[in-house]
C-alpha cells in the first residue's frame, strides 16, 4: 500500500494526512478506555494521576481498588447477576432468534418485511421507551423486579442481533442441501440438527455474542425493571458513580474491558474454527 | 436392461397438473409411464415443466391435480424423506461440513445401519465411481467432476430403486460431461436402477436414454426412444428442438397414401413429403428435413425433390463442413458435407443442385 512512484504532491500530502486522521480517530475511540487501566492502580482515592504515578514510583500504585472490589458483597452479587441474566437472555434470544430467522428465510413466508420489522424494533425504538413500556407492562403482570422480568427484557433486546446475523448466514445457505438430506431419508428434525445447524453455527455464535454483550452492558432497562436483588454490573457502577465516588469503578471497568476482549477473541476464534471445519472457507 | 420385457408403470404420472399461482398450469395433464430399470430422460427448454415434474416425483413439489404412483402406490401424501428415491442435484448438494465418506455414510446412518456395514457400502460406492481414495476429503477440496461423482455415489449408496438426476452434468466442461455421460450410462446398466434424468441438452438425452420425453409448454410433445425422436419427430417443435433441422413452410395441395404434395410459400416450388402430422388437403404445414439427408448434385430422377440453392456461407467444423444455402426463399437452409478427400470443393456464391427423398422430408403441424 505504499505510494506509487507517479504520485503527485497533492496525493503525497493526502497519503500522510489520511494516516494522521486514522490515528486521531483511533486515539479518540480508545483513549478514554485505555486511560482507565493505569488509573485503576492508583494508590490514592482520586480519578487523576498523582505525582507518584507520573514519575512511576512504586508507592503510587496499588491493588487496593481491586481488593475493594473483590471484597464487596454488592459488587460480587452484581457480577453474579450479570452473568446469570446475560447467560439466560443469550440462550433464550439465540434459540428464538434462530428459529425466527429460519422461518423468515422461507420463500413462502407471508408478511416477511412486517415480521422482520417487529422483531428488529427493540434496537430501533429508543431504549428508554422500551424500558418504560416494559416497566408498566411487567408491573401489571408481576414480573417487575424479578429475574425473569429482566431476562425477558434482555431477551427482547438480544433477539434482533441473532435474527440479523443468522438471516445473513442463511442468505448463503443452499436450500438444495436440505432437499438432498430429505432425499437421503433424513427427517426434517434430523436434517436441522445434522445439516442446517452445523452450517449456520458461525452466524448463531456471532448472534449469541452480540446478545450477551447487549445484556451485559445494558442499564436503562435494568434501572426500570430490576430491583435491588437483580442489580447488574452496569447498574452497580451507576450507583457507584452517583453515591460514592471511588476508583473501585475503574478496577471494575478494567476487568470488564479485559473480559470483553477475551470473550470476543475466544468467540471469534471459535467461529473461524467452525467455519473452517464446516468447509465454508478455504484453509 | 431397457424397456423391453421390463415391468411397465414402475413410475406413473396419472393426469398430473401443477400450478404455482392457481392460474397458469406449469404442467398440463401429464401422463407418463416409466418401466422398472428404464433410463428415462425429460428433455425440454427451461420453463417447459420438466424440472417441476422431477420435483413432484421427489416430493419437493406437490401436484395440484392427479396422482403420481411409485411401484403402484400413490405417493402424493408421502413426504420426500420417506420415498426412498435417490437424487443427484444440479449443484451436487454435497454437505460441505462432512467428508466424502461422511456424506455417503449419512443415508446409511439415517437407516440405522451398523458401522461395519456402512463402511463396506461406502467403500463399494466410492469404488464404483473411482473415488475410493478420496473418502477423507471434504467436498471443497474436490474438482467439479469429482464432486459430481461423489453426488452420484451418494444417491446410489443406499440402493434406491429409483434415482432422479436434475441436470447433473450442467456445470461440467464438454469433455468431462461426455465422459460422465458414458459412466452414468454404464452404472445404470450395471445396477439396473431406474433413472429419471432431466436435461435441456439434447445430445445428453440422445446418448444416455432408453426413452426421451420431450417437454414443451407443460406437455409431453413426444415420448420415444432416441433414434425415433431424431429420425421420426412427430411435430415441428420436436423436429426443431432435437438436432439440426431445415424448415420449409407451405400448404398441402394433394395427399396420396403416406405422401403429400406441398406448395411452398412464396411460390418457391413444390415438395413431395412424408405425411406425418397434417390435417388434410389445404392445411398449412411445416416441412422438416435433416441437413445430413440433403444430397448435393444428385443423379437426375433419383429424388422427387430437387432445388437449386445459392451458397451463402461455409463453416468449417473439422469432420464436416456446414454449408448455408439460400433455397426456396429460405436462406437458413443448412447442408452438411462430410470432410472427405474425395469431396468436391464448394465456394461461396456458387449454385448447388440439392435433392432429397420423400421419406426424409416430414410434413408436420404448421407450428
Image (cartoon, coloured by chain):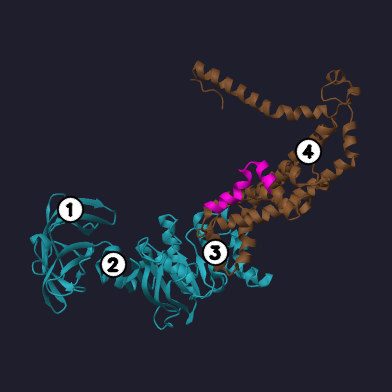
Chain colours: A brown, B cyan
Label 3: few (<14), some or many (≥20) within 10 Å? many
Cα distance, mark 4 to mark 3? 46 Å
Q: Please give the residue where the numbered disc 1 appears in the rendered image.
A: B345
Q: Please give the residue where the numbered disc 3 appears in the rendered image.
A: A180
Q: Is residue B259 above or below residue A223?
A: below
Residue B341 location, x and y as percent? 22, 56
State yes or no: residue A116 in magenta: yes
In terms of sequence position, does the residue under pointer 2 or pointer 1 come before the other? 2
Cα distance, mark 2 to mark 1? 33 Å
State yes or no: residue A264 in magenta: no
In the picture, measured across the screen, residue B143 lies left or right of residue B340, that is right
Between B308 and B224, the one lying in front of the other is: B224
Q: Main secondary structure of the magenta part?
A: helix
Q: Please give the residue where the numbered disc 2 appears in the rendered image.
A: B238
Cα distance, mark 4 to mark 1? 88 Å
Residues flagged by tags 3 and 1 on a common chain: no
Specify start and end residues of the magenta stretch as a single range: A113-133
Cα distance, mark 2 to mark 3? 32 Å
Residue A98 numbered mark, or none? none
Amino acid at each position: 500500500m505504499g505510494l506509487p512512484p507517479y504520485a503527485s504532491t497533492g496525493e503525497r500530502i493526502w497519503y500522510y494526512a489520511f494516516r494522521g486522521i486514522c490515528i486521531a480517530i483511533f486515539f479518540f475511540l480508545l483513549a478514554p478506555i485505555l486511560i482507565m487501566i493505569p488509573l485503576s492502580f492508583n494508590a490514592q482515592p482520586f480519578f487523576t494521576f498523582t505525582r507518584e504515578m507520573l514519575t512511576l514510583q512504586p508507592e503510587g500504585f496499588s491493588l487496593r481498588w481491586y481488593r475493594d472490589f473483590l471484597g464487596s458483597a454488592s459488587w460480587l452479587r452484581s457480577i453474579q447477576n450479570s452473568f446469570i441474566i446475560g447467560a439466560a437472555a443469550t440462550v433464550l434470544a439465540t434459540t428464538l432468534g434462530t428459529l425466527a430467522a429460519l422461518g423468515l428465510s422461507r420463500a413462502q413466508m407471508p408478511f416477511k418485511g412486517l415480521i422482520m420489522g417487529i422483531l428488529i424494533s427493540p434496537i430501533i425504538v429508543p431504549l428508554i421507551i422500551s424500558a418504560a413500556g416494559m416497566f408498566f407492562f411487567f408491573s401489571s403482570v408481576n414480573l417487575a423486579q424479578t429475574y425473569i422480568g429482566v431476562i425477558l427484557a434482555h431477551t427482547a433486546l438480544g433477539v434482533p442481533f441473532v435474527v440479523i446475523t443468522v438471516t445473513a448466514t442463511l442468505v448463503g445457505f443452499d436450500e438444495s442441501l436440505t432437499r438432498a438430506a430429505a432425499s437421503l431419508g433424513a427427517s426434517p428434525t434430523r436434517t436441522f440438527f445434522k445439516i442446517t445447524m452445523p452450517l449456520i453455527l458461525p452466524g448463531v455464535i456471532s448472534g449469541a455474542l452480540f446478545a450477551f454483550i447487549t445484556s451485559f452492558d445494558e442499564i436503562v432497562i435494568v434501572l426500570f425493571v430490576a430491583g435491588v436483588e437483580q442489580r447488574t454490573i452496569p447498574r452497580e457502577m451507576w450507583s457507584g458513580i452517583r453515591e460514592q465516588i471511588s476508583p473501585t469503578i475503574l478496577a471494575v471497568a478494567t476487568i470488564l474491558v479485559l473480559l470483553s476482549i477475551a470473550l470476543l477473541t475466544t468467540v471469534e476464534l471459535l467461529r473461524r474454527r467452525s467455519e473452517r471445519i464446516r468447509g465454508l472457507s478455504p484453509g | 436392461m431397457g424397456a423391453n420385457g421390463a415391468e411397465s408403470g414402475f413410475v406413473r404420472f396419472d393426469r398430473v397438473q401443477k400450478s404455482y399461482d392457481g392460474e397458469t398450469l406449469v404442467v398440463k395433464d401429464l401422463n407418463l409411464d416409466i418401466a422398472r430399470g428404464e433410463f428415462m430422460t425429460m428433455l425440454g427448454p427451461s420453463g417447459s415443466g420438466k424440472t417441476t415434474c422431477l420435483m413432484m416425483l421427489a416430493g419437493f413439489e406437490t401436484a395440484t391435480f392427479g396422482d403420481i404412483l411409485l411401484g403402484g402406490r400413490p405417493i402424493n401424501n408421502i413426504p420426500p424423506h420417506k420415498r426412498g428415491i435417490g437424487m443427484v442435484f444440479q449443484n451436487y448438494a454435497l454437505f460441505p461440513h462432512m467428508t466424502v465418506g461422511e456424506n455417503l455414510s449419512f443415508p446409511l446412518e439415517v437407516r440405522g445401519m451398523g458401522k461395519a456395514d456402512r463402511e463396506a457400502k461406502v467403500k463399494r460406492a466410492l469404488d464404483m465411481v473411482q473415488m475410493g481414495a478420496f473418502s477423507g476429503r471434504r467436498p471443497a477440496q474436490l474438482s467439479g467432476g469429482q464432486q459430481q461423482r461423489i453426488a452420484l455415489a451418494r444417491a446410489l449408496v443406499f440402493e434406491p430403486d429409483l434415482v432422479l438426476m436434475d441436470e447433473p452434468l450442467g456445470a461440467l466442461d464438454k469433455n468431462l460431461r461426455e465422459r460422465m455421460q458414458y459412466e452414468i450410462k454404464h452404472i445404470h446398466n450395471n445396477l439396473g436402477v431406474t433413472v429419471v434424468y432431466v436435461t435441456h441438452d439434447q445430445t445428453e438425452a440422445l446418448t444416455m436414454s432408453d426413452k426421451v420425453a420431450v417437454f414443451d409448454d407443460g406437455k409431453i410433445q413426444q415420448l420415444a426412444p432416441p433414434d425415433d425422436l431424431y429420425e421420426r419427430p412427430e411435430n415441428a417443435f420436436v423436429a426443431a428442438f432435437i438436432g439440426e433441422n431445415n424448415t420449409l413452410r407451405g400448404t398441402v395441395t394433394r395427399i396420396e397414401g403416406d405422401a403429400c404434395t406441398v406448395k411452398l410459400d412464396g411460390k418457391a416450388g413444390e415438395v413431395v413429403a412424408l405425411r406425418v402430422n397434417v390435417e388434410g388437403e389445404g392445411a398449412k404445414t411445416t416441412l422438416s428435413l435433416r441437413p445430413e439427408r440433403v444430397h448435393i448434385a444428385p443423379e437426375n430422377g433419383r429424388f422427387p425433390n430437387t432445388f437449386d440453392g445459392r451458397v451463402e456461407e461455409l463453416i468449417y467444423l473439422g469432420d464436416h463442413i456446414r454449408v448455408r444455402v439460400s433455397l426456396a426463399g429460405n436462406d437458413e437452409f443448412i447442408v452438411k458435407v462430410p470432410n472427405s478427400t474425395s469431396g468436391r470443393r464448394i465456394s461461396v456464391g456458387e449454385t448447388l443442385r440439392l435433392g432429397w427423398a420423400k421419406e426424409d422430408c416430414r410434413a408436420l403441424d404448421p407450428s
